[in-house]
């Protein structure tokens, strides 16, 4: 009896243990689904753009003059400050004027003598004309008097010409600035003798103009052909027949803050380098730009056209295919293959694959999965990311306008609108 009860007790313990084991080996409840990944989306910017080609060049002055002595003599003074700005007509050097002044006085005296001789010859001719009427003098004597008058007239003219030449020498003793600009150092100082005249004239200093200033650059033959095709198709005006806009920056500057125009293209391609020389002219009222500086320049590489722009970082790559991730109205991620256009700073033009109303993922691409939901936060594309070079400026508005294939509903962009920085 006792053994039967113990057997029942052990059988109960075994049943309880087995139940506990069976409960412990059961499948746990499934974990909760993760929340949709947070992403940042932006709608494409629709803007009028111009593609720009970049080149390097050197600045040069519009006018550069070597100041040389025109008369020989002793340098008495050099009143200018080296490296300063000078105005046209400012006195730069003075040469000892005394020998030239003495020569001028002598020439003036010769003029006075010639005038006296002319008065005498005129009086003699009048007397001979009256005397010939009464046959008091011969016709030969009258002819001699006329010749004497002509001779004194010629002597007077020569004397007056000599005075004019001598007066020039006196004026040239004051060497003045021929142009407005910045002057170099003194090549000759006070007390030195200088040579004047043609051929061996002494170089005294140089003056270069500052405002405006040129920027010379070279363009490769392939680009020249591209511009010619664009001009032939009416998509871009030729720099040979119109002043097209150009933008420039020196080494210390960001962006392209200086606006000018292309005013010269050479008449042939250099067969040695395969390039053609071009030139832009830029205002320089404060003299910041100096001849000889290295510069970067931009010129239009297309006409004006409307484009959809998105941040370049939003574009993914799958081998040779480019795509963007778009969040639809149900917050489901879709993949859109795209055709890329030109790059404008941090923004890329999209020729096909997106619309202006699409919400493109610009941040969180690694977390988003096509076909799955996402948690989008929409923000506008920052305007300072748009580094277009003033497409609303008067000079760029003069360029022909073309339609882009990506522009399905072009929007009008007012001139000088936000984001159109130089």
Image (cartoon, rainbow, N blue to C red):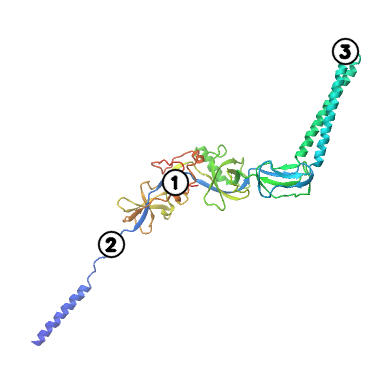
From the viewer's perspective, is 161 left or right of 29? Answer: right
Would you name the residue on which mark 3 appears?
133
> Image point 79% across, 32% down: which residue?
161
Residue located 37% across and 55% down the image: 40
At x 9% / y 87%, what residue is drawn? 2
Residue 335 locus on image (x, y percent): 36, 52
- Inter-mark Cα distance, 1 to 2: 44 Å
Rendered location of residue 32, percent (x, y) = 27, 63
Where is mark 1, residue-wise?
418
**Measured Cα–Cα span from mark 3 to mark 2:** 141 Å
Q: Residues within 10 Å of mark 2 (few under 14, many from 20)?
A: few
* Image quadrant occupied by the N terminus: bottom left
Q: Which mark is residue 33?
A: 2
Quick one: SS at disc 3? helix
Identify the mark nearer the N-term, 1 or 2: 2
User: What x and y, as percent, mark residue 78?
Assistant: 73, 47
The CA distance from mark 3 to mark 1 is 98 Å
């Amino acid at each position: 009896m006792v053994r039967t009860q113990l057997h029942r007790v052990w059988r109960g313990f075994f049943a309880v243990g087995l139940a506990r084991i069976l409960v412990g080996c059961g499948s746990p409840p499934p974990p909760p689904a993760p929340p949709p990944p947070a992403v940042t989306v932006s709608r494409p910017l629709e803007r009028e753009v111009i593609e720009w080609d970049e080149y390097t060049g050197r600045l040069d002055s519009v006018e550069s003059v070597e100041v040389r002595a025109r008369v020989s003599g002793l340098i008495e003074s050099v009143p200018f400050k080296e490296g300063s700005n000078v105005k046209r007509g400012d006195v730069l050097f003075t040469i000892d004027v005394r020998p030239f002044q003495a020569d001028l006085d002598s020439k003036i005296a010769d003029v006075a003598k010639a005038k006296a001789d002319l008065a005498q010859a005129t009086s003699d001719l009048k007397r001979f004309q009256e005397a010939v009427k009464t046959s008091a003098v011969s016709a030969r004597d009258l002819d001699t008097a006329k010749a004497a008058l002509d001779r004194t007239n010629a002597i007077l003219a020569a004397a007056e010409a000599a005075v004019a030449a001598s007066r020039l020498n006196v004026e040239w003793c004051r060497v003045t600035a021929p142009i407005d600009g910045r002057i170099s150092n003194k090549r000759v100082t006070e007390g030195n003798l200088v040579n004047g005249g043609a051929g061996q004239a002494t170089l005294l200093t140089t003056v270069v103009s500052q405002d405006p200033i040129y920027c010379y650059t070279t363009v490769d033959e392939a680009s020249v052909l591209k511009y010619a095709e664009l001009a032939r198709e009416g998509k871009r005006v030729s720099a040979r027949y119109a002043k097209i806009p150009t933008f420039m920056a020196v080494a210390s500057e960001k962006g392209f803050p200086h606006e000018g125009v292309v005013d010269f293209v050479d008449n042939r391609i250099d067969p040695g380098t395969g390039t053609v020389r071009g030139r832009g002219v830029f205002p320089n009222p404060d003299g910041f730009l100096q001849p000889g500086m290295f510069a970067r320049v931009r010129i239009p590489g297309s006409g004006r056209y409307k484009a959809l722009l998105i941040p370049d970082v939003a574009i993914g790559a799958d081998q040779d295919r480019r795509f963007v991730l778009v969040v639809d109205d149900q917050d489901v991620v879709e993949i859109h293959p795209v055709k890329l256009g030109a790059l404008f700073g941090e923004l890329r033009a999209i020729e096909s694959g997106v619309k202006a109303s699409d919400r493109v993922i610009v941040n969180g691409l690694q977390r988003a999965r096509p076909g799955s939901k996402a948690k989008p936060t929409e923000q506008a594309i920052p305007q300072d990311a748009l580094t277009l070079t003033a497409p609303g400026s008067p000079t760029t508005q003069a360029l022909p306008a073309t339609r882009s294939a990506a522009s399905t509903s072009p929007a009008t962009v007012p001139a000088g609108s936000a984001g159109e920085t130089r």
